[in-house]
């Protein structure tokens, strides 16, 4: 009898399926990160204030671990914002999405995701310091040209 290999070519049944973070948990975490960076706190300092490790703060910010209500209240006090702040701009689900789990990709979550990055925060801060509206428009045109997009003129 020839040697039979019990391995299958499809390895999908051997590796556990990695569960993706819930979009709302990701959004809340990104808002925590954005606010933390805006007030100048490190993950380590926020963790200390919460009695956690910086790794746990990282998991909250990525949406990997869900933030409980009491913890979110504690974060809101430390970061100086109301609890509702963390939900501003959160993904909204239609009834069919709740049933099927399908999400409309036409939303603007990418804006919040970008603004939660260091680059997004730095760019936003610098842009807001430009007082001249014409110069601000020129900056938008420059960035759009670098990105290779045509932007409509007003």
Image: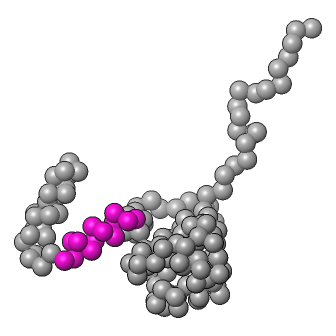
Q: Is residue 80 visible?
A: yes
Residue 136 in picture, x, y percent from top left: 13, 70
- Establish if 13 lies above or below 87: above
* Residue drawn at point x = 64 percent, y = 76 percent: 52
- Left or right? Give the position of 111 relative to 68: left
Residue 122 in picture, x, y percent from top left: 30, 68
Camera-side residue of 115 and 151: 115
Instruction: Give the image quarter of residue 10.
Output: top right
**Residue span colored magenta:** 117-129
Image quadrant occupied by the C terminus: bottom left
* Residue drawn at point x = 85 percent, y = 16 percent: 4
* Residue drawn at point x = 33 percent, y = 66 percent: 120
Residue 71 in picture, x, y percent from top left: 63, 84
Instruction: Give the image quarter of residue 49.
Output: bottom right
Image quadrant occupied by the N terminus: top right
Looking at this view, name the residue that lies furthest to the top: 1
Residue 91 in picture, x, y percent from top left: 49, 71
Instruction: Give the image quarter of residue 152.
Output: bottom left
Main SS type for the magenta part? Answer: helix
Camera-side residue of 98 and 78: 78
């Amino acid at each position: 009898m020839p040697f039979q290999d019990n391995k299958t070519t499809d390895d999908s049944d051997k590796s556990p399926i990695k569960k993706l973070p819930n979009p709302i948990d990701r959004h809340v975490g990104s808002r925590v990160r954005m606010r933390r960076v805006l007030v100048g706190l490190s993950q380590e300092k926020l963790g200390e204030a919460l009695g956690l490790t910086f790794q746990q703060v990282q998991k909250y910010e990525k949406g990997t671990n869900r933030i409980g209500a009491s913890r979110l209240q504690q974060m809101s006090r430390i970061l100086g914002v109301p609890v509702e702040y963390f939900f501003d701009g959160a993904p909204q689900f239609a009834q069919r999405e709740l049933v099927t789990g399908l999400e409309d990709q036409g939303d603007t979550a990418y804006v919040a995701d970008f603004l939660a990055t260091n680059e997004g925060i730095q760019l936003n801060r610098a842009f807001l310091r430009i007082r001249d509206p014409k110069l601000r428009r020129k900056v938008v045109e420059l960035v759009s040209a670098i990105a290779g997009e045509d932007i409509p003129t007003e």
